[in-house]
Amino acid sequence: MPAGARRSARREVTYGEQGLRLLPLTRIRGVLPAAKWTTGVGSITYSNSDRTATGSGNSEKSVYTTTAKSSGKWYAELSYFTGAANREDDEFFGVIANTGFYPGQSGSSGFGTADTRGMVNNAGGSTSGTLPSWSSGTNVYMVAVDFDNKKAWLGLNGSWTTSSDPAAGTGANVSAWTGTPSFRVATRVFYNSDAVTIVESQAYRPSGFEPWDS
């Protein structure tokens, strides 16, 4: 650490010509407090400090973050390896308010999408946009939620849907949902060769959004 700097668990203080500056740790040198998956979901193996969930057996499961959010602007990035061919259209990702359901599933009180299916919304409000087709192998899923303005965006491999820009607050895929739910980031894991990892580097995080932390 350079001279004139001190770091606590959450902040770094720097001294310079402009005086004292207090910077959030999430803004320093790419250090991000990434979320973790909730453990204990059946037929799922956890690794990488509970940031990777791998399917076990031929049965679908919904995995979801340990933390739920209800205010502020938050972003999560998932790296999903698809081991089973032609199953990308079943791997919904997004957010849920009720655990035990995958995003967009009836009863989830959340919303999500998979491949070219379009947005599936069970949280109320309006829905728009369709993602491009998944690539074979590994895909990066992007979730940005502005709770205070009730807007959310879903993206794939570095791209948001047409005319969508979370940083500018435009083109939300889901908006004006009902009530003030607490959402968890979630996805659906298939088969024993599928693995989904919460990405800590977050190369595609839009300006103004904080990393969905643990």
Image (cartoon, grey):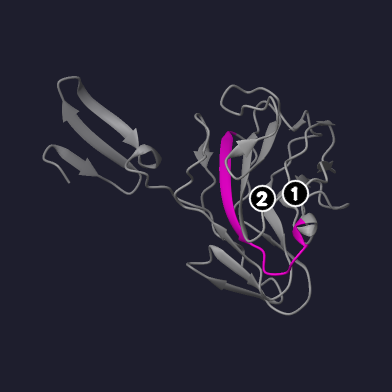
Image position of 34 (left or right of 143): left
At 75% from the left edge and 53% from the top edge, which residue is drawn?
92
> Tag 2, which secondary structure?
strand
Residue 30, by quadrant, is top left
Badge 1 density bin: few <14, some 14–19, many ≥20, Cα 10 Å: many
Q: Are marks 1 and 2 in contact (CB under 8 Å)?
A: yes
Image position of 49 (left or right of 187): left
Residue 43, by quadrant, is bottom right
> Tag 1, which secondary structure?
loop
Image position of 40 (left or right of 8): right
Read off the residue under disc 2: 184
At 53% from the left edge and 66% from the top edge, which residue is drawn?
50
Work out whether 153 lies above or below 102: above
Q: Which residues are magenta?
A: 72-88
Read off the residue under disc 1: 97
At 56% from the left edge and 26% from the top edge, which residue is drawn?
167
Q: Position of residue 103 (x, y in %)?
A: 77, 51
Q: Amino acid at mark 2?
A: Arg
Q: Position of residue 61 (x, y in %)?
A: 75, 67
Badge 2 density bin: few <14, some 14–19, many ≥20, Cα 10 Å: many
